[in-house]
Image: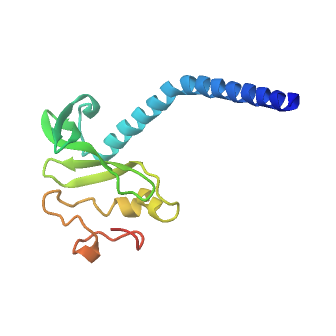
C-alpha cells in the first residue's frame, strides 16, 4: 500500500510540473502567435487587393448582417475606392473551419483569394491552398457568378468527390 501512495505522489508531481511548464510556455508564446496571425492576415490582405496607395488594414468598414460580423479592408488609389478585402469563414470543411481572405476590385471582380486557415486532409482537401485552385475564382463577378460546383450547375471544379 505504501508503494501505491508513493507512485501516486510521483505521478501527481510529474503532472503538476508538466501543467505548470505548459502554462509558462503558453504565456511565453501567446503574444508571438498573435503577432504571427496578424502578420498572416495583413499579408493575405495585401496579396488579394488591386493596386492601392493607402493602408487597408487601417481603413476598415465593419457591420453585422444575418448574425455574421463582417470587416472590409478598404483599398484606395489616389483617394478613390480601388477595392476591398474581406475574410470569410465556413464551418463546412472536412476537419473544421476554412478561413479565406477575398479581394475584389471596384467593379466587384474577384482579384484573388488566400487561405488563412484550414484543417483539410493532406493531398485531398488541402489542395485548396494550391495556386491552381485559388486562381479558379479570380476574374469572377461576386454578384452574378454561379458559385457552386459543376454537378450543381455552377462552374467550380470540385477537388475530391466529397465536395458538396
The reply, left or right, for residue 33 in relation to residue 48 is right
For residue 111, above or below residue 76: below
- Residue 112 or residue 88, whichever sits in front: 88
Give residue 12's quadrant in the image: top right
Say how many tags the image has.
Answer: 0
Residue 155 screen position, x and y as percent: 25, 71
Residue 90 screen position, x and y as percent: 32, 52
The reply, left or right, for residue 24 in relation to residue 31 is right
The reply, left or right, for residue 46 in relation to residue 108 is right
Give me the residue at 37% from left, 68% from top: 163
- Residue 91 or residue 58, whichever sits in front: 91
For residue 52, above or below residue 31: below
Give the colour scheme shown.
rainbow
Residue 94 screen position, x and y as percent: 43, 59
Residue 91 screen position, x and y as percent: 35, 52
- Residue 85 or residue 146, whichever sits in front: 146
Give me the residue at 15% from left, 34% from top: 78
For residue 160, above or below residue 119: below
Give me the residue at 36% from left, 43% from top: 44
Give residue 85's quadrant in the image: top left
Quarter occupied by the C terminus: bottom left
Amino acid at each position: 500500500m505504501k508503494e501505491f501512495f508513493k507512485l501516486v505522489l510521483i505521478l501527481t508531481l510529474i503532472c503538476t510540473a508538466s501543467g505548470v511548464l505548459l502554462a509558462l510556455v503558453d504565456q511565453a508564446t501567446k503574444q508571438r502567435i498573435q503577432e504571427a496571425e496578424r502578420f498572416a492576415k495583413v499579408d493575405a490582405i495585401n496579396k488579394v487587393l488591386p493596386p492601392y496607395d493607402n493602408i487597408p488594414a487601417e481603413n476598415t468598414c465593419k457591420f453585422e448582417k444575418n448574425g455574421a460580423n463582417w470587416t472590409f479592408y478598404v483599398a484606395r488609389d489616389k483617394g478613390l475606392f480601388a477595392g476591398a478585402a474581406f475574410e470569410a469563414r465556413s464551418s463546412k470543411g472536412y476537419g473544421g473551419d476554412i478561413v479565406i481572405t477575398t479581394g475584389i476590385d471596384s467593379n466587384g471582380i474577384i482579384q484573388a483569394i488566400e487561405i488563412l486557415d484550414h484543417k483539410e486532409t493532406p493531398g485531398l482537401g488541402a489542395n485548396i491552398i494550391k495556386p491552381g485552385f485559388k486562381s479558379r475564382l479570380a476574374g469572377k463577378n461576386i454578384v452574378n457568378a454561379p458559385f457552386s460546383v459543376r454537378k450543381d450547375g455552377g462552374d467550380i471544379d470540385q477537388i475530391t468527390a466529397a465536395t458538396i
